[in-house]
Image: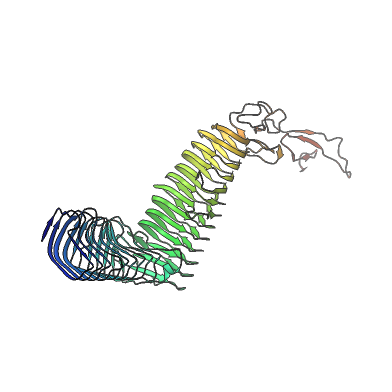
């Protein structure tokens, strides 16, 4: 029969048995081409369903159905759908194209799909909440997504070829899934995702521009699989090292996955062209040395792993160079990350150290320290002796984090050095010490709605704003050198802020609005930023008041600038010494040599020298 522009469904089979449909041609049915429900022993073979509105073939609650040799095409619907507790359905030698999905299987069991072209639509195959499903000798060409298996069990995908735009395979919440003898390719280099799955088997697969990506918040989602080295990524074997305390066999691998291991060491590898080339999940005391990772989504990914050492490694052309998720007490040392989107991300990760690492150039962001889990934060992380240079936007970006320390690090040639979030993201207890911020177009340190910040011993040069604070409280900015910045300070709606003992040269004091700021402490003995004997306020290069009593603190034109009552001054009065020795020495008697030194800067220790009359001897 030939059906053309049928209003509704062309053929509907309900509560029937032993039905055969042969060689039908259906063009532009408004609803479905063929719809079968609550029926059994159905054979549908040989035909074309062209541009069905809702879908080409839909089966609900059917049993013992064979669908074969059909060309199934839809414009917006699903070419073939098996739903509603259907069972014993065989689909073979069919072509499915266009539509939102190719094949859709839901809440069914015992479904076999053989020798089918599963389409080029958005999603080639969906298997949801089903069991005992097999896809054999099937192809996917040009679909956005390959097979998607969710909340299903005992699924077999064998001898299939998938060429997807995005994810060639996505497994979620499933168990006992077998993927063998296949070829998978992603034109956008997305991974074959295993999200919260158990007991997966991967064997003899060829993976090009893709790789196996494991996700899950429990060790069993990482360590319960059988992934052999017969799988190859870009021509090199996959190393899956699980539940071990021994080092893996050295080799040239295309991808490395370490799952639930302790005290293992890997090193000297080149990994590239796969989304997540280096994954460490739920492991402890893993050492990764001398790695070169490039052209990927995340160069090194640690999930639930602690006390890992990552050293002497290079990451470039990655969306994220190094990613830590819920991982703690890790040590990243002497690594270089450049040319990508984000250098490093620490998510819900605490007590980690970044030491002697170089980030940039050609990164959008240096390091993000944050939390994507509500109610948790990333705390007590340390960045020490690191370089951030040539980063487009932010060197360090803090969100939902406390106790971050940045020490002896350099920030240059970027927009901002340190940036903290505004709004409802919790940030506090930040320490920045002995670091350098230069050539930053917007500024060095910018804090928003944070509390307890210490910036001390730092150098700021040629920055838009040396420091900017919006809505911050408990902020101390002390013992810093600021030279040639457009603005020294930009403060808005801040409280409990202390700014003292800074050297400010050729930098406009800045904008200070709606503030509670102290610009000096009380006059306190101790060496200040310009070498004077007292701590007090700040040194301002444009302060022209005089120091009347010579104590190194200006006495005129105070308070100066935004409110400095004790501006620091260089000591311009030289010290004096007066010889007050009386009488002459007598042989055998004690003779006192006396002098009266004076310096307003404080205590003086003079050197006294006495020459005997013959000019040949002297004593000190």
The quadrant of the image that shows the C terminus is top right
Q: Residue furthest front?
A: 15
Image position of 598 (left or right of 16): right
**At 41% across and 55% down in the image, what residue appears?**
321
Q: Position of residue 553 (x, y in %)?
A: 68, 32
- The residue lying toward the viewer, choosing from 56 and 190, is 56
Does residue 75 appear to the left or right of 296 in the view shown? left
Q: Residue 31 location in percent, x, y?
A: 21, 55
Q: Is residue 114 visible?
A: no
Hey, which quadrant is residue 64 in on the image? Answer: bottom left
Colour basis: rainbow
The answer to whether residue 180 is above or below residue 312 is below
**Residue 431 sits above or below residue 612 on the image:** below
Residue 221, percent across and down?
Answer: 42, 67
Q: Nearer the viewer, residue 60 or 574?
A: 60
Position of 466 compared to 228: left or right? right
Tag count: 0
Q: Between 156 and 547, which is closer to the camera in this rendering?
A: 156
Q: Quadrant of residue 255?
A: bottom left
Residue most extreme to the left: 1
Looking at the image, residue 309 lies above or below residue 443: below
Does residue 1 appear in this view?
Answer: yes
Asked whether 494 or 291 is in front, the reply is 494
> Picture coordinates of residue 383 (x, y %)?
52, 52
Q: Eyeballing the image, is 248 above or below 350?
A: below
Q: Quadrant of the N terminus?
A: bottom left
């Amino acid at each position: 029969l030939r059906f053309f522009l049928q209003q509704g469904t062309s053929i509907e089979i309900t509560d029937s048995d032993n039905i055969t449909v042969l060689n039908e041609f259906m063009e532009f049915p408004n609803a479905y081409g063929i719809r079968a429900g609550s029926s059994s022993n159905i054979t549908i073979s040989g035909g074309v369903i062209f541009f069905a509105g809702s879908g080409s073939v839909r089966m609900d609650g059917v049993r013992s159905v064979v669908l074969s040799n059909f060309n199934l095409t839809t414009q917006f619907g699903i070419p073939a759908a098996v739903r509603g507790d259907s069972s014993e359905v065989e689909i073979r030698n069919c072509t499915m194209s266009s539509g939102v999905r190719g094949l859709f299987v839901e809440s069914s069991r015992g479904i076999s799909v053989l020798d089918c072209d599963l389409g080029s639509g958005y999603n080639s195959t969906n298997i949801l909440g089903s069991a005992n499903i097999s896809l054999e000798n099937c192809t996917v060409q040009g679909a956005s997504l390959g097979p998607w298996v969710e909340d299903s069990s005992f699924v077999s995908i064998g001898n299939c070829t998938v060429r997807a735009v995005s994810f060639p395979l996505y497994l979620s919440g499933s168990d006992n899934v077998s993927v063998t003898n296949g070829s998978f390719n992603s034109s956008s280099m997305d991974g074959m995702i295993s999200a919260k799955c158990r007991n997966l088997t991967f064997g003899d697969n060829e993976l090009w521009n893709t790789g196996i990506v494991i996700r899950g918040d429990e060790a069993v989602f990482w360590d319960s699989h059988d992934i052999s080295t017969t799988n190859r990524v870009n021509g090199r074997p996959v190393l899956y090292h699980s539940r071990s305390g021994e080092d893996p066999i050295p080799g040239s691998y295309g991808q490395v996955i370490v799952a639930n291991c302790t005290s293992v060491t890997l090193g000297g590898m080149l990994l590239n062209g796969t989304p997540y080339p280096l994954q460490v999940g739920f492991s402890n005391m893993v050492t990764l040395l001398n790695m070169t990772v490039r052209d990927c989504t995340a160069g090194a990914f640690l999930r639930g792993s602690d006390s890992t050492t990552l050293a002497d490694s290079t990451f470039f052309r990655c969306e994220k160079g190094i990613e830590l998720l819920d991982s703690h007490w890790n040590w990243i040392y002497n690594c270089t990350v450049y040319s990508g989107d984000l250098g490093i991300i620490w998510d819900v990760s605490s007590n980690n150290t970044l030491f002697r690492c170089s980030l940039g150039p050609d990164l959008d962001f240096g390091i993000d320290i944050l939390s994507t889990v509500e109610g948790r934060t990333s705390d007590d992380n340390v960045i020490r002796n690191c370089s951030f240079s040539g980063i487009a936007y932010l060197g360090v970006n803090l969100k939902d984090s406390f106790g971050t320390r940045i020490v002896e690090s350099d920030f240059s040639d970027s927009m901002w050095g340190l940036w903290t979030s505004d709004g409802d993201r919790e940030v506090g207890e930040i320490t920045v010490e002995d670091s350098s911020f230069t050539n930053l177009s917007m500024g060095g340190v910018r804090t928003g709605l944070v509390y307890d910040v210490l910036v001390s011993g730092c150098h700021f040069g040629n920055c838009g704003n040396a420091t900017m604070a919006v809505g911050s409280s408990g902020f101390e900015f002390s013992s810093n050198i600021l030279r040639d910045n457009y603005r020294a300070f930009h403060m808005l709606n801040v409280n409990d802020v202390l700014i003292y003992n800074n050297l400010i040269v050729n930098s406009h004091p800045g904008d200070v609005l709606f503030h509670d700021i102290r610009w000096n402490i009380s006059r306190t003995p101790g060496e200040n930023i310009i070498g004077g004997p007292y701590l007090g306020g700040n040194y301002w290069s444009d302060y022209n008041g005089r120091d009347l009593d010579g104590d190194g603190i200006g006495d005129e034109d105070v308070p100066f600038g935004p409110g400095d009552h004790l501006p620091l001054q260089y000591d311009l009065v030289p010290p004096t010494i007066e010889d007050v020795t009386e009488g002459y020495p007598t042989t055998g008697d004690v003779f006192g040599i006396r002098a009266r030194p004076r310096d307003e800067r404080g205590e003086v220790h003079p050197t006294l020298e006495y020459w005997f009359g013959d000019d040949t001897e002297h004593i000190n």
